[in-house]
């Protein structure tokens, strides 16, 4: 069995200024956090992490460091990266991941125990749950998509209604109040056009994980689900006092 984890990163709003080594370090820290228990019980197995950034995607593969257990718990055995054709195109994300997988040594893929997908914070899209395809234009509202910015293709009334509802119900210091939060984008989608019964919200990491790794040819369409992580849940308005 392969364990699949999809989560988001808080550092992506300023990752243009981060070095490649910083990227690798943060990804390895995340991998270490999620995979430590699995690695202890499965020596010799490989653990894959995908990082979806602002300009491209990266893969890092680690395995348990059995030769020097007193040092690091893991050792990096493979890394690669590709650029997107467009950073806000879901098809570009999946194409990048498939390219990285195609370039990965087969022996590592054959012994993969867990896969982790990391995406940019509050990047989200509406998906038709019966097909798994993006259902709106633009296909995705990325982490830097601000619903208050003037755009020729945006309904001004939808902007006003979204902000009025947010300011009425969201606590002043809550992260959700930001005009770039996932909840702001969801409400903006709704006020532009009411959601269809089969439309669901998916964040970037959840969409990629579901599209590439959880979609089987014989899978029933109505079983498709998107499960979020705590950080994206916070930006959707979840009350952390209930954790």
Image (tube, rainbow, N blue to C red):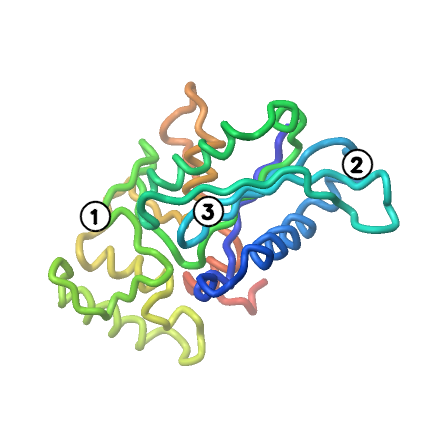
**Mark found first going from the N terminus, 2 or 1:** 2
- Residue drawn 44% across the image and 79% down it: 173
Q: Which mark is residue 137?
A: 1
Q: Which residue is mark 2?
A: 41
Where residue 183 sits, quadrant-wise, is bottom left
Residue 76 spot, x, y in % from top left: 68, 43
Secondary structure at badge 3 equals: helix
- Residue drawn 75% across the image and 45% down it: 74
Residue 140 spot, x, y in % from top left: 30, 50
**Mark found first going from the N terminus, 2 or 3:** 2
- Residue drawn 43% across the image and 40% down it: 208
Where residue 168 sits, quadrant-wise, is bottom left
Q: Which mark is residue 234?
A: none
- Vertical order, 164 against 126 (above or below): below
Q: Is residue 96 left or right of residue 73?
A: left
Q: Which mark is residue 205?
A: 3
- Label 2 to label 3, Cα distance in Å? 26 Å
Observer-nearest residue: 101 or 17?
A: 17
């Amino acid at each position: 069995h392969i364990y699949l984890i999809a989560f988001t990163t808080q550092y992506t709003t300023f990752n243009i200024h981060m070095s490649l080594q910083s990227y690798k370090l943060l990804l390895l820290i995340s991998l270490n956090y999620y995979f430590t228990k699995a690695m202890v019980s499965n020596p010799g197995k490989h653990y894959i992490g995908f990082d979806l950034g602002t300009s491209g995607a990266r893969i890092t593969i680690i395995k348990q460091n059995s030769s020097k257990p007193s040092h690091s718990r893991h050792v990096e055995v493979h890394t690669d990266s590709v650029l997107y054709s467009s950073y806000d195109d879901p098809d570009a994300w999946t194409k990048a991941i498939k390219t990285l997988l195609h370039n990965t040594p087969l022996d590592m893929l054959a012994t993969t125990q867990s896969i982790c997908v990391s995406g940019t914070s509050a990047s989200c899209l509406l998906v038709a749950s019966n097909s798994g395809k993006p259902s709106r234009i633009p296909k995705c509202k990325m982490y830097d998509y601000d619903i208050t910015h003037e755009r020729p293709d945006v309904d001004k009334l939808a902007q006003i209604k979204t902000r009025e509802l947010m300011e009425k119900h969201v606590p002043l210091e809550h992260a959700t109040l930001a005009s770039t939060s996932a909840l702001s984008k969801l409400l903006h989608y709704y006020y532009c056009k009411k959601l269809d019964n089969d439309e669901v919200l998916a964040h970037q990491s959840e969409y990629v994980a579901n599209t590439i790794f959880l979609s089987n040819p014989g899978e029933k369409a109505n079983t498709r689900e998107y499960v979020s992580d705590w950080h994206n849940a916070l930006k959707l308005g979840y009350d952390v006092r209930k954790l």
